[in-house]
Amino acid sequence: MNAIIVLIILCEIGFWVFIAAGLVARYVFKLPRVGMVLLSATPLIDLLLLAATGFDLARGATATAAHAIAAIYIGVSLAYGKSMIRWADHRFAYYITKQGEKPKKLYGKEYTLKQIKSWLQHLLAYIIGAGLLLFVTYWIGDAERTEALTNVLRVWSIVLVIDFIISFSYILYPKKKKHAGS
């Protein structure tokens, strides 16, 4: 297995381990500052992945889809990180420690706005990730060595457009609450 793929998997695991540790420190051990430090450390994982990927390419490796996925991971982590932590925090507080409000299901306008916000986060992730991919492509300066990066960027561009269509379709067709008899 490619070392970059292993590192991406370890970074994803590390991201959730830091979140879980931060939430346990905050709610179980009543150490909110320690919890905040652990939750705030998640961007360090992105820096580790960025450095490892850059080092691998700088030493002459041909870019693979794994290198492109690393850029996507960094973009997604930076764009969605805070909201993922907030999502986990809210659910941990309610379901594990029985504190706070039950997460509510959204319908209609609220759901539509959530989907549009999520698409905007996707756009931000795309801008960050695509920026990294284009930077690396320019930095290496060899289209043959970076072909995988541009191929992944094309696919991600299509996914972004599809996500746009789905997310904004809720303006015309809002999500409705299912009735008990349905």
Image (cartoon, rainbow, N blue to C red):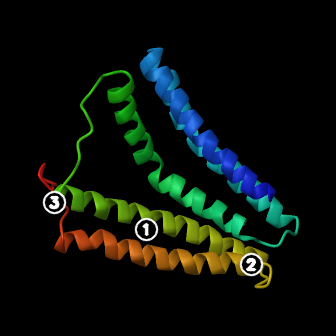
Residue drawn at x 77%, y 81% as measured from the top left: 141
Q: CA distance from mark 1 to mark 3?
A: 26 Å
Q: Earlier in the sequence, mark 2 or mark 3?
A: 2
Is 125 displayed left or right of 163 in the figure? right
Number of marks in the rendered image:
3
Label 1: how many residues lie within 10 Å, few (<14), some (14-19) or many (20+)?
many
- Locate the C terminus and report the quarter of the image it occupies: bottom left
Label 2: how many residues lie within 10 Å, few (<14), some (14-19) or many (20+)?
many
Q: Earlier in the sequence, mark 1 or mark 2?
A: 1
Secondary element type, mark 1: helix
Q: Earlier in the sequence, mark 1 or mark 3?
A: 1
Residue drawn at x 50%, y 68% as measured from the top left: 126
Residue in the foreground of this view, choosing between 163 and 39: 163
Above or below: residue 45 compared with residue 39: below
Q: Are marks 2 and 3 in contact (CB under 8 Å)?
A: no
Instruction: Give the amino acid type for the residue marked by disc 2 in the picture.
Output: Thr
In the current view of this chain or complex, which residue is farthest to the right?
59
Residue pointed to by mark 1: 123
Residue 176 has which mark? 3
Secondary element type, mark 2: loop
Label 3: how many residues lie within 10 Å, few (<14), some (14-19) or many (20+)?
few
Instruction: Give the amino acid type for the residue marked by disc 3 in the picture.
Output: Lys
Counting from the top left corner in percent of width and height, residue 52 is at 76, 54
Residue 146 has which mark? 2
Q: Nearer the viewer, mark 1 or mark 3?
A: 3
Residue drawn at x 16%, y 54% as measured from the top left: 178
Q: CA distance from mark 1 to mark 2?
A: 23 Å
Residue 62, quarter of picture: bottom right
Residue drawn at x 59%, y 57% as measured from the top left: 74
